[in-house]
Image: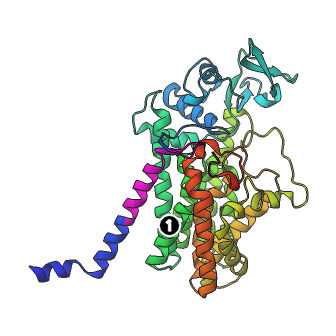
Amino acid sequence: MTRNFRSILTSETLARMAIAAFFAAIALSIWTANNRCLNEKGRLIRCSSSVVSGDEPHYMLVVNSILFDHDLALGRDYAAAAAGGQQAGGGFSSQPLDHHTFIYDPRTGVSVLWAEVYDFSHPVRENGRLIGFSRSGKPSPDPTHALERSSHPVGFPALMAGFVALLRPTPATSERDFNWVQQFLTFLGVLLTFLLCRQAQLGRAASLLAAFTLLFASPWLAYSRSYFAETMLGVLLALGAYAWLGRRPVLAAVPIALSMWIKPQYGIIAGIWFWERIWAKDRRAALSLAIVIGVNLLGIIAFDKWLVGRWLVSGNWVGWEWARGLYGFHTQFFEAEHGLLVFVPWVIFGLIWISSRAFSPGPENFTARSLGLPLILYAVMLSMQPYGGGWSYGPRYWVCMLPWLTVASFMILKQATWFPRTLFVLLVAVAMYTTAIPATLRYPWIFHTPVSASWPRG
C-alpha cells in the first residue's frame, strides 16, 4: 500500500497540487481584498466594494436597465437614480448625474450627446440642493419621441449583465453581484496569464511567478474592486492571445471580436495579427481571422446605427482632442496620476523585449511579434490623445494589457543575468508597496491621485 501511495505522489502530481493550491490562495486573496479597506487614519476596516466615480455609475446604470427594465433606454433610469433609486449604485442614490447618453430620435435620425445639450460645469441648485444642470443652448431632439441611450458601447454592461443574471440579482443586490463577477474575472485573468506564459514556452515556476507579479505588483488586484471594463477586456485579450499563440486563428478572433463590442479600437489587434500572418505567408490564418473580425465589425456598425443613429459608438466624447507634441506620450507613461511606468515600473522589461524583438522575422519570434506589434501600435494610439486614464485609478487604459506585458517581461528574464533579475525583483517590490497593496485597500479614495499618495497620511 505504501508503494502504491508513493507511485501516486509523483513529482508531476505534487506539482499539480502545488499549482492548484497557489490558485486557491489567489482566489482567497482577491475575495479578502474586496472586503477590507484602509481608512484615512490607517486603520484596516471591513468594507465592501461599490461604485466610486468616473464611468463606473454609468456602467452600473446600464447593467441595471438591462437586468430589470430589459431595455437600453436610460432616461427613466437616470431620473429614478436622482429620485433616490440605486440604478447607478448605492453611493449615487439621490444624486443627479451627468448623463453619458445620446439623445436620439429614431423617426428623424437626429442624435446629439447629452453633454452637448446640458452643461455639466453649470449645476442648477434649489435651496442648496443639486437638482440638475443648465442647458447649453444646443437644440435637442423632440423629447416626446426621443430616447436616451448609452454613449458608451454597450458590450461591457451587456456581457456583465449576462454574468450577473446568473446570480439572480435584485435591485438591492446587483451592485454587489457586479463586484462578485469582477472578482471572478480578476482571478480568471491571473489564471490566463499563467497559461499564456506556458503557451510562450516559459517554465512552470516562471509562469507562477508571472501570475503572482500581475496580481500583487500591479493595479490588476485593485481593479477587482472597480466597475470599469478593463478587467473584462484584459481577460478577453489574454484569451485571444492564448489561442493565437496556439495557432488557432478562429478561436483567437472570437474574444477579440467581443472586445470590439466593449471598445472598437481593440480591433487594431486583429489588424496587426492579420498583416503579421500575411507577412509570414500564412494566408489561411489571415483569412480566417479577417472573416470573423469583418463580420463582427459589420454587426457592430449596424447595431450602433440602430441604437443611436451613429455608425460607431466609441465613448462619451464631445469631440476628439489631439495631444500636442509628446504630451500624450508623457501622460501615458510618466504622468504622476496615470503613468504606466510610474505605477508599474517593472513593465519596462517587457517594453524592452518588445522593442528588441517585435520586428524580427522567423517563427522563433512569433510570440514577440504577436504581442509586441499590437502593444506598440496601442502605445502610439494612446499617445495621440492627452488623457492618461480619465477619472480613475492609475494607468487605467493599460490595465487590460497588463497580462501581455507580464508575459513579455518574463520572456526577457528567461535569459537574463543576475543583475537585471535583481533589478526586476526590486521594481516588483516597489510596485507592491506603492501600487498593488495600498491601491486595493484604498480604492474608493485614490482616484486621480499620484502614486505617492497611495498610503494614508493620517
**Which residue occupies the foreground of this view, 456 or 450?**
456
Q: What residue did someone put label 1 on? A: 211
Examine the structure image and report whether residue 34 is included in the region drawn in magenta.
yes
**Which residue occupies the foreground of this view, 276 or 138?**
138
Q: Residue furthest top?
A: 127
Sort mark 1 into few (<14), some (14-19) or many (20+) by Cα contacts within 10 Å: many
Magenta residues span: 22-43
Q: In this view, does 441 lie to the left or right of 132?
A: left
User: What residue is rendered at 59% in x and 70% in y?
Assistant: 285
Q: Where is residue 235 in the image (x, y as percent from the top left)?
A: 54, 57
**Which residue occupies the foreground of this view, 374 or 177?**
177
Could you tell me which secondary element the residue under label 1 belongs to?
A: helix
Q: Is residue 192 left or right of residue 431?
A: left
Examine the structure image and report whether residue 441 is included in the region drawn in magenta.
no
User: What residue is rendered at 60% in x and 80% in y?
Assistant: 422
**Which residue occupies the foreground of this view, 209 or 453?**
453
Q: Where is residue 53 in the image (x, y as percent from the top left)?
A: 65, 37
Q: Name which residue type carries label 1.
A: Ala
Q: Where is residue 245 in the image (x, y as percent from the top left)?
A: 55, 72
Quadrant of the rendering where the C terminus is positioned? top right
The answer to which image quadrant residue 115 occupies is: top right
Q: Which residue lies furthest to the left in this view?
A: 1
